[in-house]
């Protein structure tokens, strides 16, 4: 890459940074004030592109070129109104719920908005018009550069300056900055928190919509933009520092320039090896995030996050259920009889295997999320490591399938051993995002290592041993392994190790004072969770006969989060109930309607509003009230 190519790539990075900053700035504002990790923010970006496309088409004929430029701010305002409606109708009702349940609600909003876009605009990508007056290119050092990208380069600093003036030179901005530091104290001083939150959420959604609208001449409107955008926006916000607008701009510049330079460098031969830097664009931002969080845990310009006063209620000590043994025995008998009772419908056995693997995956995630208090957005990494390890051991190393079921989880635990050492040094959202970064790094390696992992096609022909070829036989194997695994996890939680985990979660300083090595306990918990997630991945691979990079993707981790939260974070049975409920709903709804995401999202929203402590948590709470009332 010569000097002129370097300059052009530098400019490409600046244009990309402006678009990325608009989305990340809104997300940073929303989190800073409301403390909501808003998964729906990428959906607002996607809506901005779609609405801008429609408005540009409708206004273009009567108004000409002015119609296009009018469509962009109108699209941003429309998205802002959608954001205000989401905040007032949904989020305002659950601000006092645990923060992770708010995250679950925004995930449900993602599903609803995606299918709403599918219904309104269809499944095809929609290519917007070129920007009037900026449809051509300019020559820079002998190379052509899109003139519209030059406009985007200017937009970013202008928005940054306007936000700085709004937040530092107005009373509303003073209230926002105060709420970022201590929102409860702002409420105690008489400020109407509800309307402040609505205003901030509306502004954040408007910025996301504007970012999407400005992308219309550069990329088509597509249904996949929501998850793609939210991943990049989260990275920018975390690298810059949660709640820091200047930090978001610096991080957007850093990440966009690194991506642009990787594309510009291309393939380089070094010491006999061919290095394709272009492939690094799939994971470059997550590498940056991992390095930044390890070196500076609060981001480049962030501050340590103040503890929230809206935490869930204090939990009672874990005690074995009085009738737990009888209930477990009855459940095992029912599960053992299931294939015999459904011989006329073999699909029920296949679905039951999926439910079992999902239950083990959710139980392993709950092990570190509930008792240990470590939130993970990247637990799919260990699920995928177990699945790929089993497939490679059988196909490449000739290891018997039975042995691979024990070796593969150990390899997944080894990955958790490495990643966990870094992760347990962080907490809160920063810990969750570091787990996501490591998971995306693993996904990128699997996705691009064609010679070993099969690349995007994955590995096929991963079948169980002959004596397990029948679905009934494999079901009983899965039932036995999942049952033993869940009992082991439950036993560990009732053991001194489990109490040490809870002590480190609830009061790290007191735990350290009485001799508990909190970080070591959390690290061991991380490894144990990775081990059982790897076993779930191995069972999944042999049940399907194949494994692809989707097994390690963000969607798998999000599914695990939804299962745990839907069932209830404060109960040991919660992940099992949540896994069965969510997986069954996914299957049942997807087979009956094309708009299954919206229906599933609506059901999840109803469950969140009706059972803010999760399904199992609600049942446990009601049972405790009934028993206490009967005792009186």
Image (tube, grey):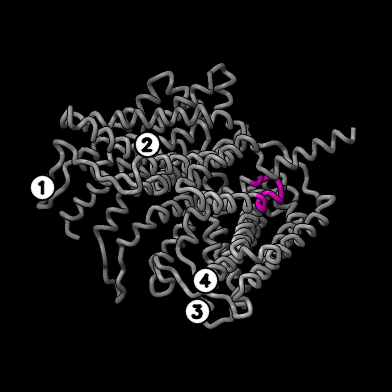
Q: Which residues are magenta?
A: 567-577
- Residue 9 located left or right of residue 316: left
Q: Nearer the viewer, mark 1 or mark 4?
A: 4
Q: Which label belongs to residue 395?
A: 3
Q: Nearer the viewer, mark 2 or mark 4?
A: 4
- How far from the left and from the top, in percent, is residue 14? 26, 44
In which quadrant will I find the N terminus? bottom left
Q: Which label belongs to residue 139?
A: 1
Work out how far the residue at label 3 is from the one at label 4, CA to CA, in angstroms. Answer: 12 Å
Work out how far the residue at label 3 is from the one at label 1, CA to CA, in angstroms. Answer: 54 Å
- Residue 67 located left or right of residue 543: left
Work out how far the residue at label 3 is from the one at label 2, CA to CA, in angstroms. Answer: 46 Å
Name which quarter of the figure residue 622 lies in.
top right
Q: Which residue is under mark 4?
A: 545
The answer to which of marks 3 and 4 sits earlier in the sequence is 3
Name which quarter of the figure residue 473 lies in.
bottom right
Q: Residue at x 65, y 51 (%)?
A: 575
Q: Residue at x 41, y 42 (%)?
A: 42
Q: Is residue 438 magenta?
A: no
- Pick whichever, 395 or 581, lies toward us: 581
Q: Is residue 275 above or below residue 174?
A: below
Q: Is residue 205 above or below residue 231?
A: above
Q: Residues within 10 Å of mark 4 (few under 14, many from 20)?
A: some
Residue 314 shows up from this direction: yes
Work out how far the residue at label 2 is from the one at label 1, CA to CA, in angstroms. Answer: 31 Å
The answer to which of marks 1 and 4 sits earlier in the sequence is 1
């Amino acid at each position: 890459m010569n000097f002129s190519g370097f300059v052009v790539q530098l400019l490409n990075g600046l244009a990309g940074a402006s678009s990325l900053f608009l989305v990340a700035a809104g997300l940073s504002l929303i989190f800073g004030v409301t403390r909501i990790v808003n998964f729906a923010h990428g959906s607002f970006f996607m809506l901005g592109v779609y609405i801008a496309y429609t408005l540009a088409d409708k206004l273009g004929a009567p108004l000409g070129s002015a119609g296009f430029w009018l469509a962009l701010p109108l699209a941003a305002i429309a998205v802002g109104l959608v954001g205000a409606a989401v905040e007032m109708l949904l989020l305002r009702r659950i601000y006092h719920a645990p923060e992770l349940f708010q995250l679950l609600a925004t995930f449900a909003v993602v599903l609803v908005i995606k299918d709403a876009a599918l219904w309104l605009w269809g499944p095809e990508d929609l290519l917007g018009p070129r920007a009037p007056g900026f449809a051509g290119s300019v020559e820079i050092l002998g190379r052509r550069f899109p003139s519209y990208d030059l406009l985007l380069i200017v937009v970013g600093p202008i928005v940054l300056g306007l936000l700085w003036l709004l937040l530092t030179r107005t009373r509303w901005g003073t209230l926002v900055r105060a709420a970022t530091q201590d929102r409860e104290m702002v409420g105690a001083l008489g400020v109407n928190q509800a309307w402040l939150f609505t205003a901030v959420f509306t502004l954040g959604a408007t910025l996301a919509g504007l970012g999407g609208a400005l992308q219309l001449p550069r990329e088509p409107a597509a249904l996949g933009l929501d998850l793609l955008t939210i991943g990049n926006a989260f990275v920018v916000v975390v690298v810059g520092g949660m709640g820091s607008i200047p930090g978001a701009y610096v991080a957007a510049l850093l990440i966009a320039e690194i991506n642009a330079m990787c594309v510009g460098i291309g393939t380089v031969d070094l010491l006999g090896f061919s290095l394709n830097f272009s492939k690094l664009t799939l994971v470059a931002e997550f590498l940056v995030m991992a390095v930044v969080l390890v070196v500076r845990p609060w981001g480049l310009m962030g501050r340590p996050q103040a503890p929230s006063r809206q935490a869930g209620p204090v939990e009672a000590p874990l005690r074995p259920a009085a009738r737990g043994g009888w209930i477990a025995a009855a459940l095992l008998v029912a599960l053992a009889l299931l294939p015999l009772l459904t011989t006329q419908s073999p699909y029920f056995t296949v679905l039951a295997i999926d439910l079992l693997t999902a239950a083990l995956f959710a139980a392993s995630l709950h092990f570190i999320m509930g008792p240990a208090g470590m939130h993970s957005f990247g637990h799919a990494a260990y699920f995928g490591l177990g699945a790929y390890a089993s497939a490679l051991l059988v196909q490449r190393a000739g290891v018997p399938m039975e042995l691979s079921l024990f070796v593969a989880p150990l390899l997944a635990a080894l990955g958790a051993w490495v990643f966990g050492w870094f992760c347990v040094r962080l907490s809160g959202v920063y810990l969750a995002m570091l787990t996501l970064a490591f998971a995306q790094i693993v996904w990128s390696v699997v996705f691009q290592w064609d010679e070993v992992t099969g690349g995007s096609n994955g590995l096929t022909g991963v079948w169980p041993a002959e004596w397990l070829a029948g679905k009934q036989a494999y079901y009983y194997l899965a039932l036995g392994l999942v049952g033993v695994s869940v009992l082991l996890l439950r036993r560990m939680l009732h053991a001194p190790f489990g109490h040490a985990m809870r002590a480190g979660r609830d009061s790290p300083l007191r735990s350290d004072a009485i001799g508990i090595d909190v970080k070591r306990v959390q690290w061991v918990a991380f490894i144990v969770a990775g081990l059982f997630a790897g076993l779930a991945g191995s069972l999944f691979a042999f049940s399907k006969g194949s494994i692809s990079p989707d097994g390690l993707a963000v969607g798998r981790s999000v599914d695990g989060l939804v299962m745990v939260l839907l069932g209830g974070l404060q109960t040991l049975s919660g992940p099992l109930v949540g896994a069965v409920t969510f997986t069954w709903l996914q299957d049942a709804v997807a087979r009956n309607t094309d708009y299954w995401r919206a229906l599933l999202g609506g059901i999840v929203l109803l469950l969140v509003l009706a059972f803010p402590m999760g399904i199992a948590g609600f049942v446990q709470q009601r049972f405790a009230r009934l028993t206490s009332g009967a005792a009186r």
